[in-house]
Image (cartoon, helix red, strand yellow):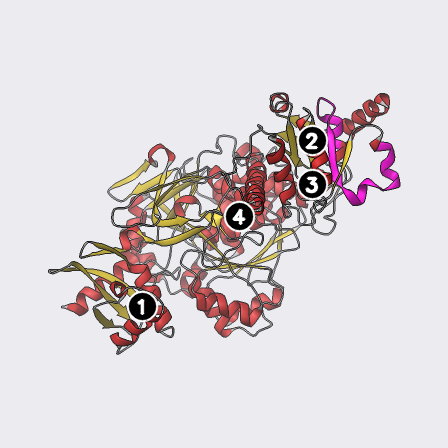
Amino acid sequence: MRVVMFITKMLFKLMYRVRVTGLDNFKNSGERTLIIANHISFLDGMLLGLFLPREISFGIHGKYYNKWWFAPIKRTMPIFAVDHSDPMAMKTIIQHIKEGNKIVVFPEGRITNTGSLMKIYPGSAMIADKADAYVLPIRINGAQFSPFSRLKGLLRLRWFPQITLDILPAKKLEISDIRNSRERRKQGAIILEDMMRDMLFNTSNYKMRLWDKLLEAANTHGKKHEIIEDLERVPLTYSDVFTRAMVLQQLLPKSIKHGERVGLLLPNVNGCYITFFAMQARGAVPALLNFTMGESATTAALETATIQTVITSRKFVEAGELEHLIEVIEKKADVLYLEDLRDKLSLAHKLKGLFMAKFPIFGIHRLIKNIDSSDAAVVLFTSGSEGTPKGVVLSHENILANIEQINASIPFNTNDICLNALPFFHSFGLTAGSMLTTLNGIKTFFYPSPLHYKIIPEFAYDIDATIIFGTNVFLAAYAKHAHPYDFQTMKYAVAGAEKLQDETRDAWMYKFGIRIIEGYGATETTPVISVNTPMHYKAKSVGRMMPGMQFRLEHVPGISEGGRLFVNAPNVMKGYLMHNNPGVLLPPEDGWYDTGDIVSIDNEGFLNILGRAKRFAKIAGEMISLTAVEELCKHCWPEHDHIALAFPDAGKGEKVVLLSTLEKPVRKELISYAHEHGAPDMLVPKQYLFVSEVPLLGTGKIHYVAAQALAEKLLK
């Protein structure tokens, strides 16, 4: 039998080029060890049995244990039937580990049919807990692309993909001192799942350049795989993107230096995506300009990032009536139009571009050889909702790390179709709506504006979209104008950038039967910090932290619950560009980013946003959340928009003034509503100002600077 095992191992090495990392972690894991692995194919058990360096035992699902074809395998190694409903079966495994043995279990209990983690059964955690065993995570990768997986139709399968086994350090389950066995099992399962999510992220390769990842995606899903489409309704494949980007990068001015920040002013179209990667190939850093932020903010952005050149399109400028904005930009930078570059296109450019795309080793790789994964990949600008916009510098690693964090949390596949109307200059639109999708082989339809509330649902219906990203404002508007069947193929409606209102959540559930997935993030974190998932969802929370993310809460005087959130992770930005020190990178202190948000975290790890630290008013010594004031007003008067603002008050230090589209608010109504719902009187504003509409940024978020200025003007 040993001879058979040796021959089988050699065949596997030859066919699948199996690579094993972290063998020292296996050797140092101790005698009592529960080995956990993700379950992606029928090859998994054989791979672990062949390539782990000593004899191990296996716990397998009971339905396979008694199959006739499994009898020869049971004669080669100790096999135990795992039945999560049979305590005696579990006791046998626990005793086996206590005797100083290593045993492999698959906590998911079945082979994945999504490509991501399935649900984690608490029995595996109970085994580790009862046996006082170390848990050794092993990530199996590559076998999901073989015909022995259950992902036919979801991935491009091939007979002999390369397979890796990554062995991570062993650790004990740190279950708190809970006597209740049911709660202990539940907590153990959560810890075990977090361990497996961290395993998927920590073994992913995000220390790459964006071009490397794009080339890898093409190799994984096929160069002829359609990947982007826009209103022209001409889908482009990976190969098309490579060729067009290689042609365009030749036409960019030779004066553009390596590492130079170059402005990009384009809407969501295929051309923007291609221009982005053409700039990357030339070593330029795209600085994505927000064409909705106004002339003064655009000027500030150009100065902050020391931008000397801006690339745009005449067709876009005319369609968006941005001529005056271009005049302002021309005072600070040279403006290049894609149409003018196209006029310089020759047959030689086309042939060279085709060759460079066809043979990346002589083209793309040569162009990007001096770019490091830690170098700047893009500059985004904060919304300026609370002051002058700052430049946020994100590296290739920042973007790819956030993508891998999301991949470890939410299952996607190549059958998905994303409708992305969020602009590239919005971090949510860039990372989630564009890079996450296309680098995972998900066809992405670019729509140029999220404000076309009636048209976007029609496009979702037309293209059979399964994924849409949006803010509360946009998703609420789509729900209002959509036909109940427009989103009939939708799997994921993901909300971010601002708080999801109950009315929006309910509208999507009752009208379309879709549960909106709410997340939380910041431009500085590329952007996702936490997100609800199909497996872990809690309404009114913003989900659980991304894997690989450290955090701490700092106490805020006057606030009893939660604290100010600081995060440290591979997706935290390289640093800021500040207007008062143009072009100079200011990295976060010791890698920690201060979100400025007051949050609480419950015992299951779900985050709840209590408000911005800057959006609290101190009234008679009490800290009052202006966000809570807005929530109270929104629930009492749901048909109107409200902004709570703090102003000085001679008697109590500060007072709350409400800017509202309700013309004549009756304060008694709000007081009665507050009493009925257990809210304190302190949340009821003292003064009310009527506006026909509240100031908003182009992203749909409230423009607090403009709102404060407007309120000051009305109070005079």
Vertical placement of residue 278 versus 632, above or below: above
Viewer-nearest of labels 4 and 2? 2
Q: Is residue 264 left or right of residue 360?
A: left
Residues at marks 2 and 1 touching, judged by CB atoms closer than 8 Å? no
Q: Secondary structure at mark 4?
A: helix
Viewer-nearest of labels 4 and 3? 3
Amino acid under disc 3? His
Q: Secondary structure at mark 1?
A: strand
Q: Residue at x 25, y 46 (%)?
A: 557
Viewer-nearest of labels 2 and 1? 2
Q: Is residue 43 left or right of residue 409?
A: right
| Residue 331 position in % (x across, y down) | 28, 51
Residue stretch in magenta: 47-73
Q: Which mark is residue 95?
A: 2
Q: Which of 466/442 is in front?
A: 466
Amino acid under disc 4? Met
Q: Secondary structure at mark 3?
A: loop
The numbered mark, 3 or 2, whose residue comes first in the sequence reads 3
Q: Secondary structure at mark 2?
A: helix
Q: Which mark is residue 435?
A: 4
The numbered mark, 4 or 3, whose residue comes first in the sequence reads 3
- The residue that disc 3 covers is 39
Local crowd at mark 2 within 10 Å, few (<14), some, or many (≥20)?
Answer: some
Q: Residue at x 84, y 41 (%)?
A: 66
The numbered mark, 2 or 1, whose residue comes first in the sequence reads 2
Distance of label 3 from label 2 (alpha carbons): 24 Å
Residues at marks 4 and 3 touching, judged by CB atoms closer than 8 Å? no
Q: Which of 630/102 is in front?
A: 102
Amino acid under disc 2? Gln
- The residue that disc 1 covers is 642
Amino acid under disc 1? His
